[in-house]
Amino acid sequence: MKNEQYKNEYDKGLLWSFLLFIFIMVLLILFTYKGNQTAIENKEITQRKGSESILVNLDNLVELSKDDQITADTLRSIFSEKQKWNLENSFNKESYTEANVIFYNHLPYIDYQNYRNDSISIRFSISSNKKESSGIQLFSYSDILKQANEYYNKGNYKKALIYYLSILNEYPNDINGSFYGGICYYNLGDFENSIILFRNAYSTGYQNFKQEANLWIAQSYIHLNKELKAQYWLKNVIEENSYYANQAKQFLENIGVKKND
C-alpha cells in the first residue's frame, strides 16, 4: 500500500516537474519574442563615426513636415521619372560605377547578399513588473534590411533608422545603410548626420545613389543655413547635367545665387 502511495506521489512529482518545465519554456519564448519586438523600440543606439562610437538619442529628433520629407512614395516616383529621363536624354552612366541591385517595396538596394554573412546585433531592453533586463538579439543582414525597409516604407523613420544604423555598426561602409539612413536622418531634421551618411553613400566605390545624395547634401546645407556649402554641392549637381540639374538650378535661384554660364 505504501509503495503504491509513494509511486503515486512520485508520478505527481514528475507531472509537476514536467508542467514547470513547460511553463519556463513558454516564458523564455515570450521573453525572446518580446526582446525582438523591443529591439526596435530602443531609442538609443551606438553609431560608429570613424573609429569612434557615439550614442544617438532618437527621442530628440523631430520629423519634418510631410511635404519636406523624402518619403518612400516620393523616392519611388523619383527613381521612375529618372529612369525615363535617362532614356529620353541618352544620359551617359558609364562614368558611374554601379552595383547590382535588389528591390524591397519597389525601392532599390545594393545587392550584398553574397558578402554579408555575419549576424548583426541589436541591443534591446525589456521592462516588466518594475524589473528591467537587457540583452542582444542577432539578425541576418537581409532580415535587418527588409525590416528597415518596412519601417521606412511606412514612414516610421526612427525605427527604420535603428536598423540602418545597426547595419553600419557591423559594416561601416555599407551603401544601403548610409543612403537610406541618411534619408531617415534628413526626414527627422538631423541634417548634420544626414550629410555624413549621404557622403558615405558613394565614397566607397559604387555610385548608384550619388546623384540623389549630392542633391540632398545641398538641401541639408540649405536647411542648416549654410548657403556657401549648399552652392558648392548644387553646382556639382548642375555640372553633371543629370536628371537633377534643373532642380539644382531652382534651388540656387531660391537662395539668391545664379550659376554663371
Image (cartoon, rainbow, N blue to C red):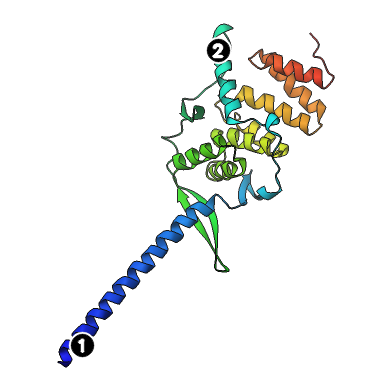
Residue 208 drawn above or below residue 65: above
Viewport quadrant of the N terminus = bottom left
Q: Residues within 10 Å of mark 1 (few under 14, many from 20)?
A: few
Q: Which residue is found at the position 61% from the left and 24% from the top?
A: 210
Task: Identify which residue, 22 or 183, lies in the foreground.
Answer: 22
Q: Which residue is found at the position 54% from the left and 56% from the top?
A: 124
Residue 201 image point, x, y percent: 60, 31
Amino acid type at circle 1 is Tyr
Viewport quadrant of the C terminus = top right
Residue 138 image point, x, y percent: 46, 51
Q: What residue sits right under mark 1 in the picture?
A: 6
Task: Identify which residue, 42 or 15, lies in the foreground.
Answer: 15
Q: What residue sits right under mark 2 in the picture?
A: 84
Under tag 1, what secondary structure? helix
Q: Residues within 10 Å of mark 2 (few under 14, many from 20)?
A: few
Q: In the drawing, what numbered circle is on residue 90?
A: none
Q: Residue furthest right?
A: 256
Residue 77 image point, x, y percent: 58, 21
Residue 182 drawn above or below residue 34: above
Asked if residue 228 lies left or right of residue 110, the reply is right
Under tag 2, what secondary structure? helix
Which quadrant holds residue 159?
top right
Distance from Cα at disc 2 to Cα at disc 1: 83 Å
